[in-house]
Amino acid sequence: MIITPKDRITAELTEMDKFLNITMSESAEEAVQRGNDLAVYVARTGKLLADAKYWLDEAMKSEVLNTLRDTAKEAKATATAVNALVGSLCKEERYLVNWCERNNRTATHQLSWCVTIISKAKEEMKMAGFGNNNTRRNFNE
């Protein structure tokens, strides 16, 4: 099992974020090219999300946090208070999970937009008579 290190996850998400924040035109050619990149990003963010969750799980079950949980329980702290404390100590890992999810959703929505743009261009070509046998026949008459 190959788990992406946390610093590498951050670096990849930063690069993806730059791409995801570019406004696309309504050009079908651009939509095809961007769609190809987005499909890769959807897959990659899925893997990075799994890796970020691995790091979060590792942090949550660390020796320090287990000791903290036990101490808090002995001190009669509420479960909510213990969970809030543990959650705050794992904020970096939780942030990576949230960022992966956000980039994955953004790439997925943008990919859908690319499909819409391509469909629109195909429909416009049909309406203009491209690829229509009747159009060719009219030119030959």
Image (cartoon, rainbow, N blue to C red):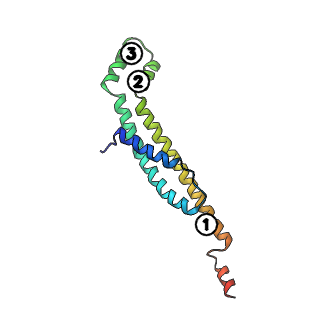
Which residue position holds label 2?
Answer: 86
* In front of the other: 75 or 49: 49
Which is nearer the N-term, disc 2 or disc 3? 3
Whole-percent x, y for residue 45 in the image: 44, 46
Question: Circle 2 sits in a helix, a strand or a loop, which is it?
Answer: helix
Disc 1 crowd rating (10 Å Cα; few below 14, some 14-19, many 20+) is some
Q: Quadrant of the N terminus?
A: top left
Q: Residue at x 67, y 71 (%)?
A: 128
The label shown at residue 72 is 3
User: Visible in this render: residue 50?
Assistant: no
Q: Residue at x 37, y 28 (%)?
A: 60
Describe residue 14's horizontal placement relative to residue 129 as left or right.
left
Residue placed most toward the observer, 40 or 26: 26
Looking at the rendered image, the disc whose residue lies closer to the viewer, 1 or 3, is 1
Q: Earlier in the sequence, mark 1 or mark 3?
A: 3
**In the figure, residue 135 lies in which quadrant?**
bottom right
Q: Is residue 91 above or below residue 101?
A: above
Q: Which quarter shows the C terminus?
A: bottom right
Specify the label residue 122 is tagged with: 1
Task: Specify the amino acid type for callout 2.
Answer: Val
User: In screen coordinates, is 10 left or right of 132?
Assistant: left
What is the crowding at mark 3: few (fewer than 14 residues within 10 Å), some, or many (at least 20)? some
Amino acid residing under circle 3 = Ala
Q: CA distance from mark 1 to mark 3?
A: 63 Å
Circle number at residue 68: none
Q: Position of residue 52 (x, y in %)?
A: 39, 38
Mark 2 or mark 1, which is nearer the start of the sequence? 2
Total tally of numbered discs in the picture:
3
Q: Where, by quadrant of the figure, is residue 87 drawn?
A: top left
Residue 131 at x, y percent in the picture: 61, 75
Disc 1 versus disc 2: distance between alpha carbons?
53 Å
